Image (cartoon, rainbow, N blue to C red):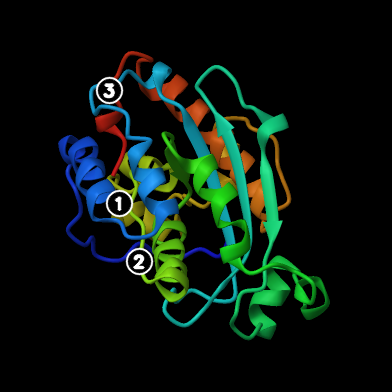
Amino acid sequence: MLHLIPDKKKPEPTALAWPDLYLKLAEQAQHPLLKTFYQAGCVAPDTPLNQVPFVAMDFETTGLNPQKNGIVSIGLVPFTLERIRCRLSQHWVLDPGKPLNAESVVIHGITHSDIDEAPDLEKILPKLLEALAGRVVVVHHRGIEQPFLSAALKARIGEGVMFPVVDTLELEARLHRGRAVGWWQRLLGKKPVSIRLADSRTRYNLPYYAPHHALTDALASAELLQAQIADRFEPQAQIKTIWH
């Protein structure tokens, strides 16, 4: 995953709006795959966390701009608070439809030879949307996956996509970025706590995984959310307390 610093938040559906929004989107969607996706519904905002079906998702991309760059790989890992379903995980390397650049290749290691025979996103779209349907998507920095997927779908089928997201980076920011570094700490060279995926996992004594592989990063995000909830939330807390 390529990481961004979170931008100013754009207006988005409130927690209470998601199930009703899915009903409206199902009526408005023109493409049958999107219509089926929305018809699968969305969990109610008062659903306890321990009853929510999640799916961790991670993208590797050719850059950080969803309007100019493309998706080169997708990793999906379905899970609940009690169990990660590795057997049902999925990973695709894709033709991004955009030029690879040297900087992104160095980060994720996917080269021109890797994508020569790779499918376009549209080929795997039925499997992708089926895997996301009815689940709450978990990412580490929501400025990547949803905007990139929506932009990619608009370019291919003329319609974007919307879905609720739990952002493990944002949950770490709630805890650590609200704590200002004092002048004495700054004088001693203390920096703000890192909320990058690997550093966040370290705080919960989770094992180190090599970064920038979509499937591994998806698994890492799933494990991180399980640890965050175990550490700071009650299993009966409602999903609306953590989703966007």
Residue type for callout 2 = Glu
Q: Nearer the viewer, mark 1 or mark 2?
A: 2
Badge 1 is on which residue? 182
- Between residue 116 and residue 136, name the one nearer to us: 116
Res. 200 visible in picture: no
Q: Position of residue 214 (x, y in %)?
A: 65, 54
Left or right, 201 with respect to 233, comes to: right
Alpha carbons under labels 2 and 3: distance apart: 31 Å
Image height of 115 relative to 20, above or below: below
Mark number for residue 159? 2
- Between residue 121 and residue 78, name the one nearer to us: 121
Residue type for callout 3 = Gln
If the image is split into quadrants, where does the N terminus sit? Answer: bottom right
Q: Position of residue 212 (x, y in %)?
A: 66, 59
Specify few, some or many for label 3: CA neighbours under 10 Å numbering under 14, 14-19, or 20 or more. some
Q: Position of residue 48 (x, y in %)?
A: 32, 18
Q: Residue 133 occupies which quadrant of the picture?
A: top left
Image height of 124 relative to 137, above or below: below
Q: Nearer the viewer, mark 1 or mark 3?
A: 3
Res. 88 visible in picture: yes
